[in-house]
Image (cartoon, rainbow, N blue to C red):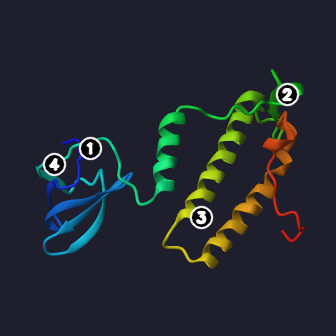
Amino acid sequence: MDQTTLGIGTRLQHTQYGPGVIVGVRYAAYLICFINHGKKEIDKTDAHLDEIIPENVTVEVETVSDTEKSLLKILRLWGNVTEVVPLGEKWIGGTLFLQPADKSLKPKEIPMADFFHKIVMLRDRLRVLEQNINSNKKLSDEEKVNLQQYITRCYGSLTTFNVLFKDKEHWFVGDKSGDS
């Protein structure tokens, strides 16, 4: 069963919670009202769900707020667009050469473009982690601040790699106060 397109009113059976009805559709989850367990948010891909009677089957998502609706529209529109981060000209075609202290061991050569790509992916994943922390409803503000400080320190540790970037706007920026 394709559980990612069920609509409000669909009757379901869950192996743990029993029978229920979808009362809300989120981006990655359904809000289901179970007869014996009340409302629960269940991941759309939960293997314990079995469809009984589908209703209002659609790929559209009902969201909690107008902001979420706008964001989903933008994500659908620009979902396949990724930021192009250029490598500094002096590194194009270059090679990263890692020589172990023990000269009897073979050195490792990595194309600079491949190494740079890994750095950019790391930066992008840190940004996604930041967004997930900021939008997490279970974390307190204090916990969010503490986790953000760790991420800022990670950025600070990565500033060494800023020399690879063509444009300063793509650089890693750590704590500017000098505390870390």
Mark 2 packing: few (<14 Cα in 10 Å), some, or many (20+)? some
What mark, if any, has residue 91 been given in the picture? 2
Q: Nearer the viewer, residue 68 or 162?
A: 68
Q: Amino acid at mark 2?
A: Trp
Q: Earlier in the sequence, mark 3 or mark 2?
A: 2
Mark nearer the N terminus (2 vs 1): 1
> Is residue 41 visible in this depiction of the protein?
yes
Query: Residue 156 at what x, y percent from top left?
Result: 81, 57
The secondary structure type at the circle numbered 4 is loop
Going from the N terminus, do you reach mark 4 or mark 3 first? 4
- What's the residue type where badge 4 is placed? Glu
Please identify the quarter of the rendering in which residue 121 is found.
top right
> Does the residue at mark 2 contact the one at mark 1 (Cβ under 8 Å)?
no
Q: Amino acid at mark 1?
A: Thr
x, y percent for residue 5: 26, 44
Q: CA distance from mark 1 to mark 4?
A: 10 Å
> Which numbered disc covers residue 55?
4
Quarter the C terminus occupies: bottom right
Question: Real-space Cα distance between discs 3 and 1?
Answer: 28 Å
Q: CA distance from mark 4 to mark 2?
A: 57 Å
Q: Is residue 111 visible?
A: no
- Chain-order first, disc 4 or disc 2: 4
Q: Are the residues flagged by discs 4 and 3 in contact, CB closer than 8 Å?
A: no
- What label sits on residue 153 in the rendered view? none
Write down the residue under mark 1: 5
Task: Say which residue appears at 82% left-offset and 43% top-offset.
Answer: 169
Task: Please report contact status of discs 3 and 2: CB closer than 8 Å, yes or no.
Answer: no
Q: Residue at x 74, y 33 (%)?
A: 85
**Tag on residue 134?**
3
Residue 80 sits above or below residue 13 on the image: above
